[in-house]
Image: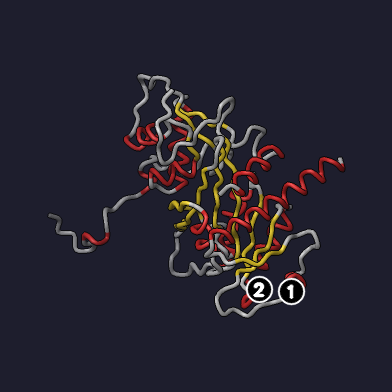
Amino acid sequence: MSNDRWLDEDAGPIFRPYTVTRGRTRPRDDTLDLISLLEATGLPVPRRTRLDPEHRRVLAVCARPVTFADLSSEIDLPVGVVRVLVDDLRDENLLRVLRPTPTGDVPDELVLRKLLHGLRAL
Amino acid sequence: MDYAHSDTAVRRPAGGPPIAAKILVAGGFGVGKTTMVGAISEIRPLRTEELLSERGTGVDDTTGVAGKTSTTVAMDFGRITMGDGLVLYLFGTPGQQRFWFMWDELAVGAVGAVVLADVRRLADCFAAVDYFEDRGTPFLVAVNCFDGAERKDPADVRIALDLDPDVPLVMCDVRSRESAKQVLIGMVEHVLARTTAAAAGG
């Protein structure tokens, strides 16, 4: 197929992760935690917006609420790359971030009690 | 809405959004972090690619790789789905100090941390103990008792690690699901005690 002398098939496909993000490495903000919940808004894709296949995969996985960690694992791209994709989609209002817990980031007493109950029931 | 079951969807509890919580599992290299996460939860792979931090450059020998500005770190995380839309995530944090930039991100919003210790190499968990003490993240020390490992008096381990009296210390076998479960229960109980004490005091 290819006469490439440097890599054989065992090396796998050559893929530069940040070409997916058009060279952007900095996310819009740093608030996206690995357990932040993401959900597609279900709004139509704006006419001027061109989504890459990776964007569409993110949207498909986020059809139901999913944590950023699970999304990244599912998409199988580095976390930093998925973060940029998520920010693109947030910019277009196609994706929204839900708080991981009802009161914010640090679990409150009610969540801790639920957690304890859940662990004991394992 | 469509609530079809899937591997990754977090079920939305009645009357509210889903709830996700995380606990960190820290400790030296090879102490059993991944074993513990695997004993109690469904393990999922995560790829991270992060810029080398200032702190990292002091440790990583980057001589000869001029221009290398990023490093790839593979890490696992565990997920335990509980009733009522509550999902617990366990993140094993790489023990080496050069990964501290990841700890900073992981520690935000965490319920707390489990510091795994191996009595043969207690010094390996000093960094983690220091880190969580400085940060004010509640933590518990779990001494992993390997087969044939020398049994140590918990009081001696406590002294060796210079632990504050209120930091729980437990013995465990990370290969055992029940033992891993008891470690997590102990950790959450500790956090809950701190939370209620803080509420009563102020």
Q: How many marks?
A: 2
Q: Does A57 sit left or right of B128 as displayed?
A: left
Q: Residue furthest right?
A: B201
Residue at mark 2: chain: B
- Marks 2, 1 in one chain: yes
- Examine the rendered structure and indicate whether residue A4 appears above or below residue A39: below
**Residue at 71 percent of width and 62 percent of height:** B130
Q: Position of residue B117 (x, y in %)?
A: 63, 68
Q: Residue furthest front?
A: A121
- Examine the rendered structure and indicate whether residue B74 appears above or below residue A69: below
Q: Does B37 sit left or right of A16 as displayed?
A: right
Which residue is labeled 2 in the image?
Answer: B123
Q: Does A14 sit left or right of B54 as displayed?
A: left
Task: Tell me if mark 1 has few (under 14), some (14-19) or many (20+) residues whose alpha carbon lies within 10 angstroms of its own.
Answer: few
Residue at mark 1: chain: B
Q: Which mark is residue B160?
A: 1
